[in-house]
């Protein structure tokens, strides 16, 4: 389990993060109780340092933030959620976390991707976007002084699913439409209330997303296209062979706790290092806010995974 290691490294991570406090909450942000999507999306953020296209589609771009300090910078790849729907969310959702990590000395690469019903979204396009966006760091690392030996992925909700998948894609069979021979190496994953199994997600999708979005996204049910569910669900490609930290609010009514517990058990049984961190009093959106009580735990998990080996 990773949690004892996080505790043991509490002093070590201060070298990277300077042990900064939780950012002061803006007047509009709720740090206790149930934050809704509108309140979550109203959290303040600063413009990114650079917006860079990794493909030709209007949704194939990412925002890069780079600390002002000299030297190579560790990188956190950020992937937003929103039920894989264009109307629900954009990469703006992860901008507050990006700002907070930049202040800690961590560069962030906040990925946008094609979402339903945009042309090319779903299977396989959305996954191709996440893969291409992740690997595009190789094209810009030298220019922006990015340390590709220290890269983690952080995703919220549907983005947590995509983050786990990005770390698992090295286990795809060569026959897969999503197979890439040499994907960028990832140090670890911080999943903020995101599903690790798409077939299991069907049990909660209507309550969480107001539609049967999984079947639309993957082009059918698990019975119709079982190979697609197997190739996009991290739970079907265990072990991932990288540490995974799952952060969940115990009042999450969109992605119930049992989803996290089921995935954590499967990953641990497969031999992966998995830490399930349950934050009392928080719902689905607070875990992705740098103004909530979850943030020190998220920050420390990222910092620990980025420590030089």
Image (tube, rainbow, N blue to C red):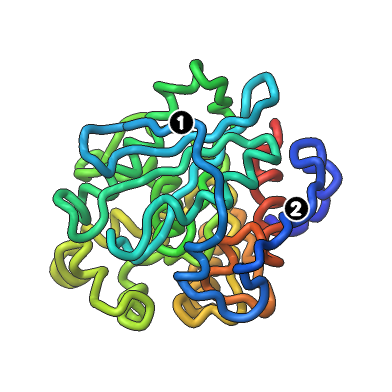
Residue displayed at 58% across by 34% down: 107
Is residue 171 visible from the viewing direction of this image? no
On the image, the x and y values in percent for residue 87 come to 29, 63
Crowding at dot 1, Cα within 10 Å, few <14 / some 14-19 / many 20+, comes out as few
Residue displayed at 70% across by 45% down: 304
Say which quarter of the image contains residue 201: bottom left
Secondary structure of residue under mark 1: strand
On the image, the x and y values in percent for residue 185 come to 48, 34
Q: Which mark is residue 50?
A: 1
Q: Which mark is residue 98?
A: none
**Above or below for 135 versus 143:** below
Secondary structure of residue under mark 2: helix
Q: From mark 1 to mark 2, how far is it between C-alphas?
A: 32 Å
On the image, the x and y values in percent for residue 58 come to 24, 41
Residue displayed at 65% across by 56% down: 298
Q: Dot 2 corresponds to which residue? A: 6
């Amino acid at each position: 389990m990773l949690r004892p290691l996080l505790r043991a490294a509490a002093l070590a991570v201060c070298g990277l993060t300077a042990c900064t406090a939780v950012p002061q909450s803006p007047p509009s942000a709720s740090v206790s109780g149930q934050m809704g999507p509108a309140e979550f999306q109203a959290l303040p953020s600063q413009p990114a340092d650079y917006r860079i296209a990794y493909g030709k589609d209007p949704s194939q771009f990412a925002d890069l933030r780079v600390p002002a300090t000299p030297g190579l910078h560790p990188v956190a790849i950020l992937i937003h959620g929103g039920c894989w729907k264009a109307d629900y969310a954009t990469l703006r959702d992860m901008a507050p976390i990006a700002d907070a990590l930049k202040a800690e000395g961590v560069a962030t690469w906040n990925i946008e991707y094609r979402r339903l019903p945009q042309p090319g979204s779903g299977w396989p396009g959305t996954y191709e976007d996440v893969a291409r966006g992740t690997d595009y760091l190789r094209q810009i690392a030298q220019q922006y002084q990015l340390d590709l030996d220290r890269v983690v992925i952080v995703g919220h909700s549907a983005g947590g699913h995509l983050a786990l998948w990005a770390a698992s894609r090295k286990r795809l069979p060569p026959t897969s439409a999503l197979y890439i021979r040499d994907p960028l190496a990832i140090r670890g994953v911080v999943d903020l209330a995101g599903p690790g199994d798409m077939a299991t997600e069907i049990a909660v999708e209507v309550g969480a997303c107001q539609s049967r979005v999984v079947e639309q996204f993957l082009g059918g049910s698990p019975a119709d296209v079982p190979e697609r569910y197997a190739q996009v669900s991290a739970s079907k490609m265990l072990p991932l062979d990288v540490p995974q930290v799952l952060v969940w609010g115990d009042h999450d009514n969109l992605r119930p706790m049992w989803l996290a517990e089921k995935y954590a058990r499967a990953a641990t049984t497969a031999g992966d290092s998995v830490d399930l961190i349950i934050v009392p009093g928080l719902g689905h959106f607070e875990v992705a806010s740098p103004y909530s009580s979850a943030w020190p735990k998220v920050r420390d998990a990222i910092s620990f995974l980025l420590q030089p080996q």
